[in-house]
Image (cartoon, rainbow, N blue to C red):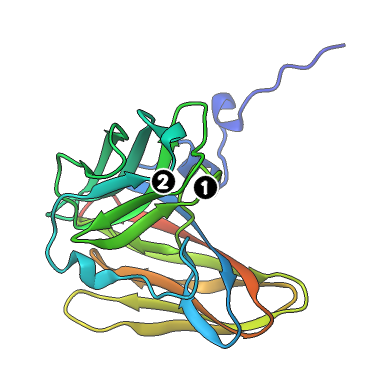
Amino acid sequence: MTYEIRSISQLGGSEPFELQLSRGQIPGHSFRHVVGEVPSMSNNQSGSLWDVNDTLYPWSAFDTPGTLSIARASTEDADKNVIINGLDVLFNEITETVSLTAASGNTTTNSFARVYTARMNGLSENVGDVTITRGGTTVARINAGVGQTIMGVYTVPAGYTAYLTQGVMTIQNTADATGKFYYRVPGDRFIIGHLFEVASSEYLYSFTCPLRLPERTDIDVRASVRTNNAKVTSAFDMILIKNGGPL
């Protein structure tokens, strides 16, 4: 006997909200899962969970939006393509592909106000580091052999409100740290939206009521490592709802 597997919705029934959201069945709604990792945070150091150790993410590099410059460290990455995702000068989502023709000085055509992911295009990963800068400051880096950025930073696009539903942080065995979820609404400074401790394990928190983050809000997940150099990872889930869209 064989069984035909069909979606509940195809039978005229209903599905959980989360599944409908992932299937694009709810107009004006979308899902974001943002992951971050710092390869090795030093003892008694603090920093953002992104691809550069022991540093806070350089938000000030985007005080003036503009084109990005991309450099490759290895000749084996010559002519490979990098896909950059971020926001344009109006804070609308934008994607651009740049070829690593030269060792440095490969620039975007578009101006960027934010960058939140970058990845190698195609089947091959990057042999050496690929560094993306704005005005001479590193704003994203694809570490050698990784093939993509792993950045615990994000900015809510214009015209949308984000609702943070869950966050998680892990730290490697024998180490411990304080984790901080920072956010900054336009015209204000960064404030702590959630604070937690993690030690040789995982910290997971689901918000009883999602944290509301307006358009153009910057998000920055940071950690302060107290014992043993440590790899720290994070992830957070958000639902984006278009402002003024269908209820």
From the viewer's perspective, tell me whether residue 47 is left or right of residue 12: left
Q: Does 129 sit above or below residue 183?
A: above
Q: Position of residue 157 (x, y in %)?
A: 25, 56
Mark 2 surroundings: few (<14), some (14-19) or many (≥20) residues within 10 A: some
Q: Position of residue 90 (x, y in %)?
A: 12, 54
Q: Does 35 sit above or below residue 8?
A: below
Q: Position of residue 47 (x, y in %)?
A: 46, 77
Q: Residue furthest right?
A: 1
Q: Does 13 sit above or below residue 207?
A: above
Please tell me which residue is depicted at 50% across the width and 65% down the height of the picture.
165
**SS at circle 1:** loop
From the viewer's perspective, tell me whether residue 13 is left or right of residue 71: right
**SS at circle 2:** loop
Disc sitting over residue 59 in the figure = none
Q: Does 93 sit above or below residue 63?
A: above
Q: Earlier in the sequence, mark 2 or mark 1?
A: 2
Image quadrant assignment for residue 170:
bottom right
- Tell me the kind of residue under disc 1: Ala
Q: Are marks 2 and 1 in contact (CB under 8 Å)?
A: yes
Please tell me which residue is depicted at 28% across the width and 36% down the height of the picture.
102
Name the residue tied to disc 1: 144
Q: Is residue 242 visible?
A: no
Disc sitting over residue 73 in the figure = 2
Total marks in image: 2
Please tell me which residue is depicted at 62% across the width and 83% down the height of the picture.
177
Image quadrant assignment for residue 119:
top left
